[in-house]
Image (cartoon, rainbow, N blue to C red):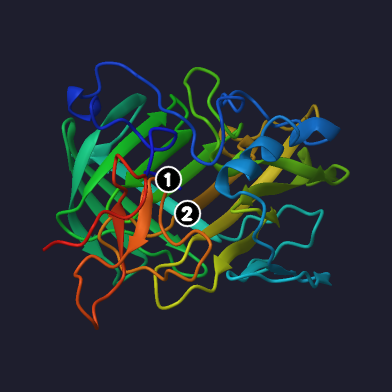
């Protein structure tokens, strides 16, 4: 999933270099076809053909079928060892084709107690504080300073890490406060994405969109009295499952592999619309033209040392096997690095 191979995650080899330059990073859940350029024209039929189809194959080998449900329809598919569920649950006030800004997801970012301003950061950090008393507040000790991130969402947003955990941060902000951020959590094979701006990806930086994120549908423009806004539906592909979430909606994909850690993807779409025009006598604030504000998290399969279930088709992350390392009864199966000679579980310790 997110950090288990060089295909995903920020490169820690460059993480301590600091913010001197943007080295970029390989995409999560896909190949380099999704280069992070502007993908905001939702009316085109090929909105997902360059990303979602390729990305769907990288998360799974296609043998896992699941049960898919949303608010409008349901399908029943044959299930294998792993049952997946997909939910698109309307938690905001949107009415389909009328964009509504009701605070489904909100965030603030500061650096050393000040506004971030226009910047690009690409570096390793350590989680210094986690507070969940009122939303979620994270404090990261980074090369460039102390980064403060405050978020709130419905449903609640989880920390993904604990104090002392290493993370990899990529942050790009514009002069108008547009924000594109990715945080990778190698301890959990997890990633967090925050997107806020007029485009899903910045025009002046490399930001591969996660899991084939792209517009998949759009409504006819709505006249809000100043601007003409076309509400969009955004889609992703994760572990062979498709998820579509519209403006002011929340959706998730989860796999029922308990009690072992489960792959999951959660997406809060506070805004998803395109500005198609406006009234000549109206001068909107720049912030009102930003059509995207969303938060996405994904958690992968168990990493090395995690408890695993040998009965599952893919019980561990890539390069790991679900092994019985202790050699005596009543031990846990653990995700273990494969033997370089046999490409299987290494022999138990004597």
Residue farthest left in this picture: 350
Residue at point 42% right, 45% down?
2
- Can residue 335 be seen here? The reply is yes
Image position of 67 with respect to 297: above or below: below
Classify residue 243 by image quadrant: bottom right
Q: Secondary structure at mark 2?
A: strand
Residue 164 position, x and y percent, is 14, 54
Residue identified by numbered label 2: 298
Residue identified by numbered label 1: 2
Q: Secondary structure at mark 1?
A: loop
Residue at point 56% right, 47% down?
59
> Would you call the spot at circle 2 few (<14 residues within 10 Å), some (14-19), or many (20 or more)?
many
- Can residue 276 be seen here? The reply is no
Between residue 278 and residue 202, name the one nearer to us: 202
Q: Nearer the viewer, mark 1 or mark 2?
A: 1
Residue at point 47% right, 20% down?
205
Residue 212 position, x and y percent, is 62, 40
**Quadrant of the image for the C terminus?**
bottom left
Left or right of 69? Residue 164 is left
Left or right of 329? Residue 47 is right
The reply to whether the C-beta atoms of the residues labelled 1 and 2 are less than 8 Å apart is yes
Residue 57 position, x and y percent, is 63, 42
- Quote the CA–CA distance across marks 1 and 2: 8 Å
Residue 144 position, x and y percent, is 18, 30
Whichever of labels 1 and 2 marks the residue nearer the N terminus, that label is 1
Residue at point 32% right, 48% down?
338
Residue farthest bottom in this picture: 330
């Amino acid at each position: 999933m997110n950090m288990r191979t060089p295909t995903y995650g920020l490169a820690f080899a460059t993480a301590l270099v600091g913010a001197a330059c943007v080295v970029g990073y390989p995409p999560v859940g896909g190949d380099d076809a999704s280069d992070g350029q502007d993908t905001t024209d939702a009316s085109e039929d090929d909105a997902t053909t360059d990303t979602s189809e390729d990305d769907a194959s990288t998360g799974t080998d296609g043998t896992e079928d699941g049960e898919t449900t949303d608010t409008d329809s349901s399908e029943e598919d044959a299930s294998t060892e792993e049952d997946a569920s997909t939910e698109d649950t309307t938690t905001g006030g949107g009415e389909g084709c009328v964009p509504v800004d009701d605070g489904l997801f909100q965030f603030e970012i500061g650096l050393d107690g000040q506004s971030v301003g226009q910047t690009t950061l690409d570096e390793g950090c350590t989680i210094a504080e986690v507070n969940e008393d009122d939303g979620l507040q994270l404090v990261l000790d980074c090369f460039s300073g102390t980064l403060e991130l405050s978020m709130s969402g419905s449903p609640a947003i989880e920390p993904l890490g604990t104090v002392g955990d290493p993370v990899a941060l990529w942050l790009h902000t514009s002069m108008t406060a547009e924000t594109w951020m990715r945080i990778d959590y190698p301890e959990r094979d997890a990633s967090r994405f925050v997107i806020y701006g007029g485009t899903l990806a910045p025009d002046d930086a490399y930001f591969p969109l996660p899991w084939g994120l792209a517009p998949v549908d759009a409504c006819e423009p709505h006249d809000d009295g100043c601007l003409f806004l076309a509400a969009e539906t955004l889609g992703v592909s994760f572990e062979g499952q498709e998820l579509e979430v519209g403006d002011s909606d929340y959706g998730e994909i989860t796999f029922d592999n308990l009690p072992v850690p489960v792959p999951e993807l959660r997406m809060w779409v506070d805004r998803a619309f395109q500005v198609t025009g406006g009234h000549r006598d109206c001068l909107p604030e720049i912030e009102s033209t930003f059509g995207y504000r969303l938060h996405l998290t994904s958690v992968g399969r168990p990493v090395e040392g995690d408890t695993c279930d040998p009965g599952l088709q893919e019980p561990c992350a890539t390069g790991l096997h679900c092994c019985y390392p202790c050699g005596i009864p009543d031990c846990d199966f653990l995700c273990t690095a494969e033997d370089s000679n046999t490409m299987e579980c290494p022999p138990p310790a004597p």
